Image (cartoon, rainbow, N blue to C red):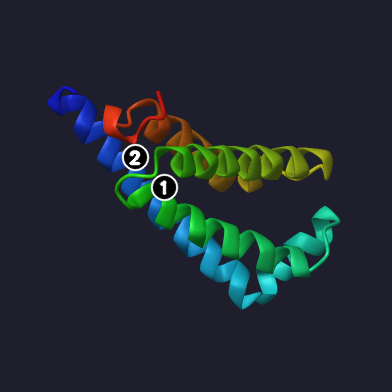
């Protein structure tokens, strides 16, 4: 792996981990703004707990060494959660500002996955 690819990987991965950890904590705390948004999107409030736990566990899986299959599942989970968030905002008729966070985390997920080192890959 080239030095530039390694730098891209770690920048994307650390930003992804920071974003998923921050949003996971906000969801676990069920902050008022987050609860209002989930109700607006049509999801039950308990879904915040599920998403928050999955995000925190996903960050741990992506950052710890070894366990490449677990990392693949974590990346897939991040991809599904963020693409689902984008579609949910779209289906609810939200404005463009609501798309920024999930879209950024989706791009970081794909970038981190694409540039991951060979020892973090299943194949």
Residue 5, how many percent across, how many down?
Answer: 23, 26
Q: Left of 4 or right of it: where is 53?
A: right
* Pointer 1 local density, CA inside 10 Å: few below 14, some 14–19, many at least 20: many
**Farthest left residue in view:** 3
Q: Which element is circle 2 on?
A: helix
Q: In which quarter of the image is the N terminus?
A: top left
Which residue appears at 62% of the width and 46% of the height?
Answer: 97
Residue 92, how many percent across, how many down?
Answer: 83, 45
Which residue appears at 58% of the width and 58% of the height?
Answer: 54
In the image, residue 96 above or below residue 17: above
Q: Left of 16 or right of it: where is 85?
A: right
Which numbered marker is on residue 12? Answer: 2
Please name whichever residue, 49 or 83, is drawn nearer the observer in this view of the structure. Answer: 49
Q: How far apart are marks 2 and 1 (CA)?
A: 6 Å
Q: Left of 65 or right of it: where is 73?
A: right
Q: Quadrant of the C terminus?
A: top left
Q: How many marks?
A: 2
Residue 113, how many percent across, how many down?
Answer: 41, 32
Which residue appears at 59% of the width and 43% of the height?
Answer: 77
Please name whichever residue, 9 or 62, is drawn nearer the observer in this view of the structure. Answer: 62
In the image, residue 26 above or below residue 12: below
Please name whichever residue, 58 or 18, is drawn nearer the observer in this view of the structure. Answer: 58
Q: Which element is circle 1 on?
A: helix
Q: Do the residues labelled 2 and 1 touch (CB within 8 Å)?
A: yes
**Residue 8, quarter of the rendered image:** top left
* Pointer 2 local density, CA inside 10 Å: few below 14, some 14–19, many at least 20: many
Residue 109, how many percent across, how many down?
Answer: 47, 37
Which residue appears at 74% of the width and 61% of the height?
Answer: 37
Please name whichever residue, 95 or 26, is drawn nearer the observer in this view of the structure. Answer: 26
In the image, residue 18 above or below residue 113: below
Which numbered marker is on residue 16? Answer: 1
């Amino acid at each position: 792996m080239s030095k530039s690819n390694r730098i891209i990987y770690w920048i994307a991965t650390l930003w992804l981990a920071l974003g998923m950890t921050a949003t996971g904590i906000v969801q676990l705390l069920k902050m008022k703004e987050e609860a209002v948004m989930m109700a607006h999107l049509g999801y039950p409030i308990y879904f915040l707990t599920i998403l928050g736990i999955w995000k925190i566990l996903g960050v741990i899986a992506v950052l710890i060494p070894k366990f490449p299959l677990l990392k693949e599942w974590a990346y897939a989970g991040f991809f599904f959660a963020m693409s689902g968030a984008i579609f949910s905002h779209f289906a609810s008729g939200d404005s463009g500002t609501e798309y920024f966070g999930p879209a950024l985390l989706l791009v970081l997920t794909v970038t981190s996955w694409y540039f991951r080192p060979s020892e973090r890959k299943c194949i």
